[in-house]
Image (cartoon, rainbow, N blue to C red):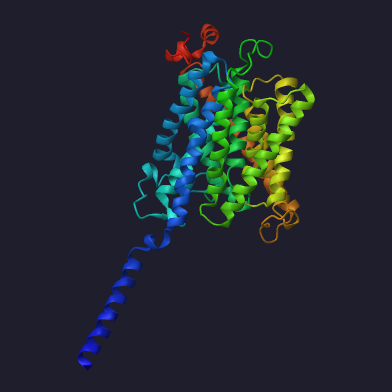
Amino acid sequence: MTFFTLNNKTNLFSIITVFLFVLISFPAFADVNNGDTAWILTSTALVLLMTLPGLALFYAGLVNSKNVVSVLMQHFSLACVVSVIWVVAGYSLAFTEGNAWIGGLGNIFMNSIELETPSGSIPESLFATFQMTFAIITPALMIGAFVERIKFSAMLIFLSLWVLIVYAPVTHWVWGGGILSSWGTMDFAGGIVVHATAGTAALVTALTLGKRRGFPKSITPPHSPILTMIGASMLWIGWFGFNAGSALSAGSGAGMAMLVTHISAATASLVWMFIEWKRFGKPSLIGIVTGMVAGLATVTPASGYIGVPGGLILGFLGGLLCYLAVDYIRGKLQIDDSLDVFAVHGVGGILGTLLVAFLATSTFSGLGLAEGQTGLSQFLIQLKAVVITVIWTSFFTYLILKLTSLVVSLRVDEQEEIEGLDLRSHGEKGYHSD
């Protein structure tokens, strides 16, 4: 009897020893959370949906019918090119340890990512893919600034270089442990990384390329508000993955980020609609969906730090100030940022980046600031981060445009602009009459 008891105890001890050895030898299995992984898988798909087909359709409906194919082609091809660039070097430059300004090249071709490699509570392969979708949509936003006049080859060269020289470093600054991160900059889902960079670069590009023929008097209205509304709806849905997915977990933080994102979008839509209704006597579909995008861009940097009051405030101010920015840039300054990228994304993203310093406090039911920070001290950090990002983006965007122009002309010729880019650049038409 004693013999069997001893053996049983010995066997039990052996089993426990083997189990502990497995846990120590394969920590990735213990670190990865299935719930978090499932949510970020979903969020990744949602963010890609924002570009393909969401943003592509949103922009396609806003241009002339003879240029609709060109806009769709630009988005689709850019998504493919940036995906490859991100794998080759973009991800490494953004998220591999380097210095305060740029990541290293130790993870080119994602060579260190294996099946079991974790990143927090999700696989690193998934984190890299999630961040890839952000890298795709950021330059895609810029397409709206130069539609109907940029040469396709110039667009591919320019934005490929831009992702490596502008987007990857700024991503490293904020999310990769770089200089802005060390300052305590708050940017939950991309007010600086995505919207400030894309908006600023869009404005620089619009000024460099010059206006479309006949701007502003001879520019035709959007050819398909229907396509624009469908694309906008996909953007709204996809933005839940953009903001709530940036929590990188399926917890309460993601839930609140989703709620304030929705509130801000709805509020800004109504603000834009009522302004137009009062001003022109009729509420427009293009107006209300543009207001939605303004609300989403404005809440993005703050979405993981604020409560419901912050969502309402950012929605109201985003709708109002972005509308005024569109009116000023297009109407007063007559800058042909064709689809108002800077006025909506740049102004909205910067506004939310600055105001999070106050809206994250308990006064507005926010989650609070870092220890030792006040609203004013955090605001100064946010302001400094915005200024340095805008300067970096402006300088290098202009430099990349000039380098691109040495290889290929930036604009299509006058005849191609008159006939439309669809047939002349791509040999296809968006619509065929019977």
Asked whether residue 243 appears in the rendered view, the answer is yes
Give the residue drawn at x 50%, y 29%: 159
User: Going by the picture, which residue comes out furthest to the right?
Assistant: 278
Residue 369 position by quadrant: bottom right
User: Going by the picture, which residue comes out furthest to the top?
Assistant: 415
Give the residue drawn at x 53%, y 41%: 169
* Residue 96 horizontal/vertical position (percent): 45, 48
User: Going by the picture, which residue comes out furthest to the front?
Assistant: 434
- Image height of 162 relative to 60, above or below: below
Seen from the viewer's position, the closer of residues 34 and 156 is: 34
Q: Viewed as shown, does residue 233 lie left or right of 92? A: right
Seen from the viewer's position, the closer of residues 161 and 371 is: 371
Q: How many numbered badges does the structure rendering display?
A: 0
- Image height of 9 relative to 227, above or below: below
Q: Viewed as shown, does residue 37 lie left or right of 385? A: left
User: Going by the picture, which residue comes out furthest to the bottom?
Assistant: 2
* Residue 18 horizontal/vertical position (percent): 29, 73
Q: Which image quarter holds the N terminus?
A: bottom left
* Residue 433 horizontal/vertical position (percent): 48, 9
- Image height of 394 relative to 41, above or below: above
Seen from the viewer's position, the closer of residues 429 and 333 is: 429
Give the residue drawn at x 54%, y 57%: 251
- Image height of 27 relative to 283, above or below: below
Asked whether residue 162 appears in the rendered view, the answer is no
Give the residue drawn at x 42%, y 56%: 34
Q: Viewed as shown, does residue 294 lie left or right of 125? A: right
* Residue 400 horizontal/vertical position (percent): 53, 27
